[in-house]
Image: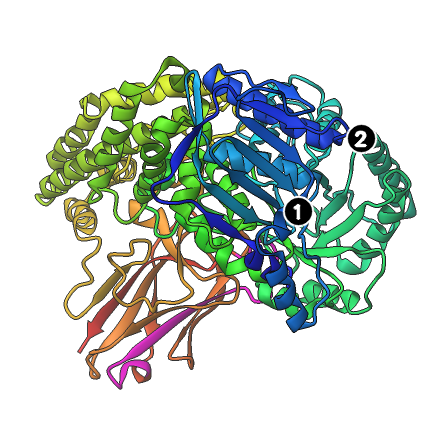
Amino acid sequence: MRRLVPALLAVAAIPTCAAELDLTRAVIVVDAHASRLEKKAAAVLAEEVEKRSWVQWPIVTAIPPGDAPVIELKNGGQTAFSARSGARNRQVIDAEKVSVPIFPPEGYRLQAGPRNVVIAGNDERGVLYGVGGLLRALDIRRERVSVPYPLDITTAPALRLRGHQLGYRPKTNSYDGWTVAMWDQYMRDLAIFGTNAIELIPPRSDDDPDSPHFPLPPARMMAEMSRLADSYGMDVWVWYPAMDGNYADPKVVEAALTEWGNVLKSLPRVDAVFVPGGDPGHTPPAVLMPFLEKQAANIRRYHPRAQMWVSPQGFDRAALEEFYSILAREPRWLTGVVHGPQVRDPISTLRKRTPARYPIRNYPDITHSLHCQYPVPDWDAAFAVTLGRETINPRPVDEAAIFHSTYRDTAGFLTYSEGCNDDVNKFVWSALGWNPDSDVTDVLRQFSRVFIGARHADSFAQGLLALERNWRGPLAANTGVQTTLEQFQSMEKEASSGELVNWRFQQALYRANYDAFVRSRLILETALEEKATAILASGSLRAMDEAERTLAEADRSQIGSAQRQRAFELAEALFQSIRMQLSVPKYKATDLSRGANLDAIDFPLNNRRWLIARFAEIRKIPDERARRQALDAIVNWTNPGPGGFYDDLGDPANQPHLVPGVAITGFGDEAGSALEWRKSTWTYAEGPRESPLELRYTGLDPSASYRVRVIYAGERRPIEIRMVANDRFEIHAYRKKEFPPAPIEFEIPREATAGGTLSLKWYGTPGLGGNGRGNQVAEVWLLCAQR
């Protein structure tokens, strides 16, 4: 019913041929006895309109005489609802015999007629969110503001928790450089789209204690952010990892109680504390939960109504079962349970195994593109090695799909964010948290209208969708990447000076130029490698020299140079406008993997580094025949020989024997180390946790003998892999992966292929905790050994 009632009450009537109410000379009316938040809502409306139009709307406490349009703000939800459909909704609810509020919290009614606009909130938050609804509907131009009418929207949020983590700490790609004023504006932006909570990070976490970008010490900024959130009526959560080791030691517990208490009592507002079970911190549940009981009492000394939440992140199977057994006792100090990255069970299972008294909060990762909870599906390796894990990543369609697959078993969400790179994704989640039936394109149009400008409402929204399509399928064949660039270049030519310094506009331009440059280089470098490989077929030392010169032509090419230069210019603009740190040496980003992809823009996109390293090794071989064999192995790398089969499991277009299902495409170690390997080992198929990878072959020669050659790649994690044929024959027991990745071969028992078919399965370490990754297979050759 929490979700049903808002659906019953949500009414939006906007005629297709609506007239316009000119609000340029409007007056905002708010009751003289309005609450602090209601007055804040009036100020938000007036200030945001003035920023965009130069139009100044007076705020008064009574409707003035004259014919100026009036925008009335009131906490009058009952009047608004009863005027349209309250009676009907009461009948529906009575028929269901469910006790629920007729006027859901935070909802509002927004009406516009020929002379006035009325925003009637169901409560004071509803007034603020009603203002956000109006701002999303306004057509704001320079010195002119209007709204379509007749307009009648009655709505309330579907999910009671709609928030985002905002961490002021060094490892983020931008947040550590934000001033109080920048945080104020960003929280306001989020509120306009219905966000009702933020999550802070304490001064001590799994991060450095200081950043060269900090405008204030972490403790002072944390207090400021708590104050700002409270000014917008937002709940304040604190993500507080338990990282002190042995919480069975009373001295450790006492020190932690003092530290947490000192931090939290300094904050003007704390509504909830969320302690992750891992990532970071890996305390067993039997020790962690008693410690959190003490912390819950400690926190409530300073914030009596503060809630305590915990997640089973990082737990292996045994620890997760222990966690469930503790939940079954229903400890009263615990408020709820969080599902996030590195939780072994899906949300649906967590909900089933958690007592009903505990709500489930979602903590989805919306900020990362690889090595994460929701990687970009089948991302081209060229993007993976250049844009990297924490790039500017508008993924509206993907995020909507993730939202719809997870929200039904939750009370809502606070997303996991590491900076403003995921800005668009935050607003998609906030909009869907309010109304899961929202059309994503409409959400993007509202986003563009509010933050870019009315004249770009559709074009910028379509541009964001196009940026997501840039990442679909093989990059070299994706001609839409060039079209996306041309669309943004057209908007850039028409943009005003104010739009050109708008950081959201700059982010989209950066991605459009970067994507196009990477594609141009990929096409060039692929062609150069094909040419070099053909040269190597002669097998001579001279051929290696000529192949090297061919590969080096990429260094002299001017292909895409305009886009490359524009990316560098936009990186500087983004550092100035929103403190994005897109380079380690230029902008003091903490690491290449933390969004510093300007430093990766020239990474090679073919096998050049690997080839040059192999050439150096081959030149040392004294025997001419052996040298020629080594060169032949390079030229015929993917050739499995007569009767054989080859799968490049990191290439969705070249994995004919992979059984679809659980497998996802993964990417090798970051920071450029994988670039020293052959490109086919940069990517791989990955089976999460205990889910096996399977290759299935048919049409084999029953009289032949077969060998399997395999390359295990991926991350450098302490995980072992086991290979089994036909669920009966162990090809090899659990063994560690080779680094750097290298081919290894094993015999296949004749009995396994006697029927003309073969199944090969790979299993990762059972019961694994942490992120569960490691069962990662890059290439497989099935070699027909003899007949």
- The quarter of the image holding the C terminus is bottom left
Q: Please name the residue that numbered disc 2 is placed on.
A: 268
Return the residue nearer the eye: 535 or 206: 206
Return the residue nearer the eye: 73 or 602: 73
In this view, the residue farthest toward the left is: 538
Residue type at the position of mark 2: Pro
Residue 599 visible in the snapshot = no
User: In the rendered structure, which segment of residues is drawn in magenta?
Assistant: 752-772
Q: Is residue 49 above or below residue 274?
A: above
Which residue: 70% across, 72% down?
97
Which residue: 27% across, 85% down?
754
Residue 51 visible in the snapshot = yes
The local crowd at label 1, few if under 14, some if 14 to 19, many if 20 or more residues have their Cα within 10 Å, is some
Gap in angstroms between the C-alphas marked 1 and 2: 34 Å
Q: Nearer the viewer, mark 1 or mark 2?
A: 1
Q: How is the image coloured?
A: rainbow
Q: Is residue 776 left or right of residue 172?
A: left
Image coordinates of residue 109 in percent, x first then y, are 58, 44
Image coordinates of residue 187 in percent, x first then y, are 61, 31
In the rendering, which numbered label is found on residue 279? none
Image coordinates of residue 504 in percent, x first then y, are 44, 27
In the rendering, which numbered label is found on residue 79? 1
In this view, the residue farthest toward the front is: 66
Return the residue nearer the eye: 401 or 659: 401
The local crowd at label 2, few if under 14, some if 14 to 19, many if 20 or more residues have their Cα within 10 Å, is some
Q: Quadrant of residue 99?
A: bottom right
Q: Is residue 2 left or right of residue 428?
A: right
Q: Secondary structure at mark 2?
A: loop
Q: Quadrant of residue 287?
A: bottom right
Q: Is residue 691 above or below residue 121?
A: below
